[in-house]
Amino acid sequence: MKSRLKERIEKILTEYGGKRQALLPALHLVQEREGHISEEVISYLASRLSLPSVDVYGMVTFYSLFSLKKEGKNIIRVCVSLPCYLRGGNQILETLKEELGIKEYETTPDKRFTLEPVSCLGLCDQAPAMMINDEVYGNLTKRKVKEIIRGFK
Amino acid sequence: MNPVKFRETKIVLKNIHRPHSRRLKTYLKAGGYQALKKVLKGMNPQGVIKEVERSRLVGRGGAAFPTGLKWEFAREAKDIPKYVVCNADEGEPGTFKDKQILEKDPHLLLEGMAICGYAIGARQGNIYIRGEYFQAYRILKEAVKEAEEKGFLGKNILGEDFSFSISLYRGAGAYVCGEETALLDSLEGKKGQSRVKPPFPAFEGFQNKPTVLNNVETLANIPDIILKGAQWFLKIGSQKTPGTKIYCLSGDIQRPGYYELPTGIKLKRLLIDYGKGVKGELKAILPGGVSSSFLTRKDLSVALDWPSVAKRGSQLGSGAIIILNDTHCMVDIARRCAQFFAYESCGKCSPCREGTKRTRELLTNITLGRGELSDLELLCELQEVMYDTSRCGLGQAALNAVRSAILKFRDEFEEHIRERRCRFGICPLGKESS
Ligand SMILES: Cc1cc2nc3c(=O)[nH]c(=O)nc-3n(C[C@H](O)[C@H](O)[C@H](O)COP(=O)(O)O)c2cc1C
Ligand code: SF4
Ligand code: FES
């Protein structure tokens, strides 16, 4: 683990008085920095918080914003909940799969994009909608999706 | 009642159209933090709670529990310290109202939380915010900092003997964490799986201490109730559950969006005057997101408040009103709803863990032309069992949409089963499919 990352984790642990409440913020930090939560990080956090590793591992698998596998540089979260589905959300997912040449939950071979179908993003008035990293995109059409993805390339 | 005034009453969204509405400066100019001042300079905690009780404010997060009563429980609880927790996890599909307050008027929420803290005797508040609400998180962080700098949060607020601070905590993508006890576990850094109730959070909540847990919109009502009084609040909207509600309109509607209106507005009026009409022909309505039961055209006259919607056999919940037109197949829609719950079930209790999976399987089979008529009875029975035996609201509500679709659109289900036909050509039925 990079020493810089360790330092920042330690800072979070101190902030929460060494309690397990520090776990979610620490995992957020690592996910953001590294694009995944590695085994090394899991055992480090487990030992620092005196928890069994499997407990920390369970956290990573329970929450959809964390992943064990390394994710692409850009994470596309496309909403598949009902309000978006009613407005053609399915086509948006299909278009993304075609355009990127991958399936759900996969990462492009060049590691640029990971595609994740997710539950409602709170953008239902702009359905169908998606997020790429922390940017939101609404009122999507097939064409708009293609333009957005090509704009990234 | 004067209808024009009736229509224009805004409480929780009254500031959002001001330029730079999120800034403390704007908030103060609009009369912000005056309610907190009023409370600290001249009301005792019991007085604050009495006022909230008299207003008959009920929770806007879904369960519509009386807010004043919840506060009273926590105030009376003997254990200390006490906590205020704000539920900003907004996850019910079709809901996007709390985000408006968080992003456009964060100080309104902070003020509401501080007043709650004073009323129940808490010094610490937490906002649990949805992991995907990146923007709202940044804005809140900035707002908390501003409020601390100017002495509206922190030690000896406004020079009085009251200290209250607020921390932010980010969720990480799990719908069930919106359920209050799952949220508390998540806030403690655990997996968000619900706790057995009772004890309710007001008695044993965060770190097992007395905790008031309220939705963003609920807390945002507090400053005006304190400043203008319960009597003023009672004059707005329905008698039993007065005030306003932010209704979120989505799906097949001309003008989707969020509309703050007095409770009890007729569904029809919301759809026509505000939503500007349905796109296509109206078929079905989910008034409280995918956790609620379908209404149909017959229900257009229903008043949008919790008791009235309940009388029609559905639930208003958080006010996520999803409109479906007649191009959708109800079997396909029921399957989508089942998929959502199977994915989001936390797996802690078996009725929900197994029930949601089984429901998805049965409905998928029907869409593939492998269903039996007895499946429909089975699904309705399963709804009852899950309603009675699931540990939290997720499992209890998971089959509302499915069961009501079967009851109200039975011909479509039978057509899929008997004739292996989907009149909309949406379900794969017999054709090879994934
Ligand atoms: C599965 C499930 C998800 C929920 N999601 C939310 C949510 O996102 N936001 C919310 O405020 N309440 C949600 N609730 C309701 C909370 O459990 C709780 O009733 C509410 O936050 C209490 O605040 P209130 O009284 O101010 O409404 C959810 C309940 C269930 C069962
Ligand atoms: S009802 Fe579902 S979500 Fe709730 S505790 Fe049981 S398994 Fe978990
Ligand atoms: S349903 Fe897609 S953003 Fe809400």
Image: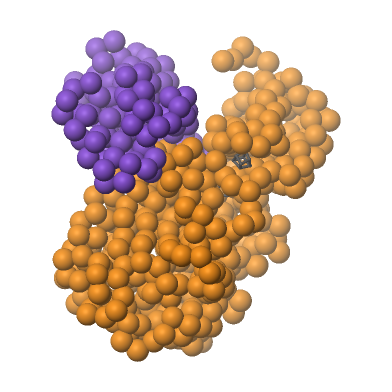
Q: Position of residue B66 (x, y in %)?
A: 57, 70
Where residue B172 sits in the image (x, y, percent)? 39, 38
Of B89 and B407, the residue lying toward us: B89
Going by the image, does B140 lie left or right of B61? left
The quarter holding residue B29 reads bottom left
Q: Residue at x 34, y 13 (%)?
A: A101
x and y, in percent, of residue B353 in the image: 64, 33
Letter of the purple chain: A
Establish if B214 lies above or below A14.
below
Q: Position of residue B295 (x, y in %)?
A: 65, 53
Give the residue drawn at x 39%, y 87%. B43
Locate residue B273 relative to residue B145 in the image: left or right: right
Q: Quarter of the image holding residue A100?
A: top left
According to the colouring, which chain is orange? B
Tell me which residue sits at (54%, 73%) in the image: B76
Q: Is residue B20 shown to the viewer in this render?
A: no
Q: Is residue B228 above or below residue B262?
A: below
The answer to which of B31 and A39 lies nearer the viewer is A39
